[in-house]
Image (spheres, rainbow, N blue to C red):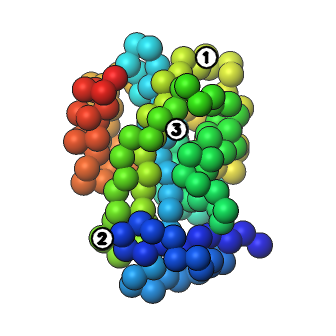
Amino acid sequence: MEYWDIYDRNGYPTGRKAVKGQQFSENDYHLAVEAWIINSKFEILLQQRSEKCPVLPNVWCHTTGRIIAGEDSLQGCIREVREELGVEISGDEIQFFQRIIRKDGTNLIWDLFLVRKDIQPSEFILQESEVSRVKWVSEETFVQMVKKQEMFQYPEIFSVLDKIKRHF
């Protein structure tokens, strides 16, 4: 059985745990991560979620995932990239970028990480239950995909992209 740590609405751990999938109260939050993987050509890696995936099947998105009890978000991000893409990330390739505390009823705290890594197509080992395919896209293609609602999006996605461009 998998457990998740519970955080308060300000992002602080409460010391309590919940069983994966358990309904949260209004003031309880759970930690999730998103990896913006960008290569040296400033291409953004997107993955299409598997049709078997219970959450957002067939949707294009970044590598994301929920954090298991006892993990911090950095450990969870490294684990999610390894599990879903079969790619190892070292400490000099990843950095915390931004925290978004969702006030939309999802009870999620999203920690966003910037991963700078050149990955060849042959290096990916996709977790078939989660990911059906991956592709590198230019910034222009990324923006078009968001505008055409061809990928998962959230209100801050363009401001995150702008911050990453300035930070890159």
Mark 1 or 2, nearer chain start:
2
Q: Is residue 45 above or below residue 67?
A: above
Q: Nearer the viewer, mark 1 or mark 2?
A: 2
Q: Of the residues shown, which amino acid type is indicated by label 1?
A: Gln
Q: Are marks 2 and 3 in contact (CB under 8 Å)?
A: no
Residue farthest along the right direction in this orientation: 1
* Residue 103, numbered label: 2
Secondary structure beneath label 1: loop
Q: Quadrant of the C terminus?
A: top left
Q: Compute the Cα span from label 2 to label 3.
A: 26 Å
Q: Which residue is mark 3?
A: 47
Front position in the image: 132 or 14:
14
Residue 110 vs residue 102: left or right?
A: right
Residue 155, visible in the rendered structure:
yes
Look at 44% across and 25% down and name the residue there.
38
> Of marks 2 and 3, which one's residue comes earlier in the chain?
3
Residue type at numbered disc 3: Gln
Quadrant of res 78: top right
117 or 124, which is in the foreground? 117
Q: Amino acid at mark 2?
A: Lys
x%, y% of residue 161? 28, 35
Q: Residue at x 77, y 73 (%)?
A: 1
Which residue lies under the disc numbered 1?
120
Q: Residue at x 59, y 59 (%)?
A: 67
Tell me if residue 80 can be seen: no
